Every structure is written in C-alpha cells, then in structure tokens.
Image: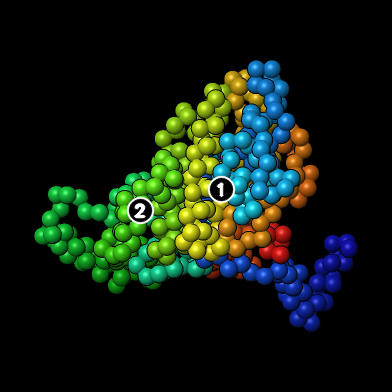
Amino acid sequence: MKRRKFIQHSATLAALGGVEPLLASADKPDFPMGKAQACILLWLGGGPAQVDTFDPKPLGDPAAKKAGSAYPAIDTAVPGVQICEHLPELAKRMDRATILRTVSHDVIDEHAAAVNFMHTGRPVSGTVAYPSIGAVVSHELGAGQEGVPAYVLAGYPSVSRGAGFLGAKHSYLYLLDTEKGPAGLTRAPDITDERQARRDALLGKVRETVRETRSEEDPVVKYDALIDESSALASGAFSEAFDLKSEPEELRQRYGAEFGQRCLLGRRLIQQGVRFVEILDNLNFTNGTGWDTHNDGQVKQHELIRGLDQALSALMDDLEVHGMLETTLICVAGEFGRPSSFDGGGGRGHQGSVFSVLMAGGGLKHKGAIGKTDEASKVALERPISVPDWHSTIYHALGIDYHNDLYDGDRPVPITDRGTAIRELFV
C-alpha cells in the first residue's frame, strides 16, 4: 500500500475509532506471558568471542591468519547444538538454556556506546537519559519483599546501568565486596552512636526544608526518600544476604573464585526479594584484558571461559535445588561479539553485526539454540534478533507488558524500541 493510501485509510479508521484497536491487536503477542519472578544478568564486559564460546565454527589458526574458532566444539544435552570444549558443565545443562546466536546491533564497535545500547536498548541521546533493563524491572515490579532493593549491581557502577529518567528510586544499589555488602550501608568505625545522632538531626532539618519547598516530583525529593530506604537496608534482614560463610563450604567451592562467589550472592539476593541482579565478571582482569581479547588477551581466554562454565553451572544447579530456576531468568551477555578472523597480535577485534546471548531458566521453553550464522559468524542466516527483541523477551518472561509506556515527565516513552519477544521461547 502506498504511503498516501495508508494515511487516507488511517484517517478514515481514526474517524470511526478503529485505528488504535487495530494496531494494538497487531502488536500484542499471541503467546502466553512468562511467570518468572526475577532476573540475574551475568555481564561479560569487553565482549566475548561467540566463535570461542556459544557459536563454534571450524578451527582457525592465528599464526597462519586462518579465521575460525580457537577451541574444538563439544556436543551438548540438546542434539545438534554444540558449544566450546571449555564449557563442559554448561553442555550438560543446555536443555535448560537457549543460546540466541543471531543478536546484533549497528552501534559503533566501541565499548561504552555498545554497553549503553545493550543495557538501554537505545543509542546514547543528548536529550533523554534512557533507563536500563534493571531500572525498568524495578519500576514495573518493585522489590519482591519489603526492606530490600529491587535492583542490585555486583560490580562497578556506570551511567548505562542507571535509571535514567525513571529517577534515583529505580537505580541500582551497588557493591564490590561480596561479604561486606554495599559500602554505603555500613557506618565508618570512628562514627559513634552519639556522632551519628547529631548528624541525623542536622540532616533532618535539611530534609524537612526540602520536603516543604519542593514538589513530590522533584529529583531531590525522590532522592530524599532513598535515605529512609538506605537506613532500613542497613539495619534489616537484607544485610544477611552477604553472609556467604553461612553457606556450606562445598557449595562455595563449587561456585569457584571471585565471579562465582558473586553468583552465589546473586542467588541469595533473589531469595531476599531482589528482582534484578547484574553481576560483572572478571573485575580485576585476571587474563590481562578481560573478555576484550585483542592481541595476547586471546591466549588466556580459556581461563575466563572455564570460570564462566563453573559459576554458571553452579548457579543453575543451586537455583534448581532451591526450586528457583523456573522462576529466575538467567542471562549471559556482553556488549558485542568478536570476528572469527584474528588480528595482527593473534587476538580478535570487535563485532556488533552478530553475536551470542544466552538465556537460562526463567520458565522458558528452551531450545538449546535459536538462530544460525554463516561460517565466518558475521551474518545472521536465520532468525535475526535485535537488542530490543532480547529486552522484550526478558520483560515478557517476567510478566511485564513491554508494549506499555514509561514517562519522561509528560512524554511517553515505549518500554522497548519496537522490540518483539522471541515467540519460540514461550510456546
């Protein structure tokens, strides 16, 4: 239909009150909403190479400049689906997971811009600060219990992971030390009860003035409300989640090193009622470069892959033992993938044209893998998936209607940028 004809028909339908229902019925999914109650995002910062993890190709050779995977592939619990040999534990559990092999974005292959796009589903804007996935989940669902935050970040804070125009109430509470918890919730050793009381009294006068002179929608007033919430978190049962030593030593060892311990904390936070937990991997760059495997970073990449295998498989098993795997969605992602070709130093560059994201648990109808790429892993041959599609799938799994609008002041902003939930995971 030509544009002019479409406009004419739309105007006629509008006069009859028919446009909105027609468009709504076309957009709404014809498959059931998910019943997951929480989400854990495992973030592989730097961009993992899909050909060396979740989308193996014929073996390459960096010395000979031959493109391909760095490691052999192994079979999984799902016939026809293979993954890297350094993911043997995950391979046994792939019947409870799905690799989205054809995720893509056209953001410039630069880390900060791509991290922002993967978290918000939109490019950086000079006029609008868009909320991240965790912030949207916080806004739409809130915390599962009183006295806990809805959104926790286990790793370094960043604007891309923030609440944007949704405000401070829906931003993350972050921590770096898994056993001590968020540093901002604990009082410094030299602050006595008397000193704290004097501080609270002085702050109380400032807060009273703010509440009397500003509207409820003022960001300062919203931030003021967080003070009471922070106090409640510091003194309530929420702090018990960080007592990892209360877990059996065998279980702690099963999870592995630093990243694994944050994954164990993730399970404990979800048990407390936190809705969205993001856990950053390899904070201290144990292989020298993290997942950003340029040049020599490729050499020790297998150490990161093995660490992911141990932590992820332990998390899946632990959630299952606690009866939580079906209600907890696990996602594993980075900001982009990497090409199958090797750079001059034997590593890999950046690639957003196609890469892999893994989803596990969450009550989804898992397929092992969805989508197919070409032999160079540069092009989606079957079932391309956009980042907004991935976001929509997360929201749909959590029972959030991603067709709804959020509001930046009076301006409606769709929850996703024209995303559509992946039907195959719900039927």
Which quadrant would the C terminus be assigned to in this image? Answer: bottom right
Helix, strand or loop under label 1: strand
The spot of residue 26 in percent (x, y) is: 76, 69
Horizontal relation, residue 115 to residue 239: left or right = right
Q: Is residue 22 above or below residue 218?
A: below
Q: Is residue 239 visible?
A: yes
Q: Residue at x 52, y 27 (%)?
A: 300
The spot of residue 378 in percent (x, y) is: 72, 37
Q: Depth check: 317 or 331 in front?
A: 317
Horizontal relation, residue 122 to residue 201: left or right = right
Quarter-of-image position of residue 330: bottom right
Q: Is residue 132 visible?
A: no
The furthest residue to the bottom: 16
**Amino acid at the residue labelled 2:** Glu
Question: Circles 2 and 1: CB distance less than 8 Å?
Answer: no
Q: Label 2, on which residue?
A: 247
**Amino acid at the residue labelled 1:** Val
Q: Residue at x 20, y 50 (%)?
A: 188
Residue neighbourhood size for the residue with mark 1, other residues' Cα within 10 Å, grouped as few (<14), some (14–19), many (≥20): some
The furthest residue to the front: 250
Q: Residue at x 29, y 72 (%)?
A: 212
Helix, strand or loop under label 2: loop
Q: Residue at x 69, y 17 (%)?
A: 64
Q: Label 1, on which residue?
A: 332
Q: Is residue 273 above or below residue 250?
A: below
Nearer-N-terminus badge (2/1) = 2
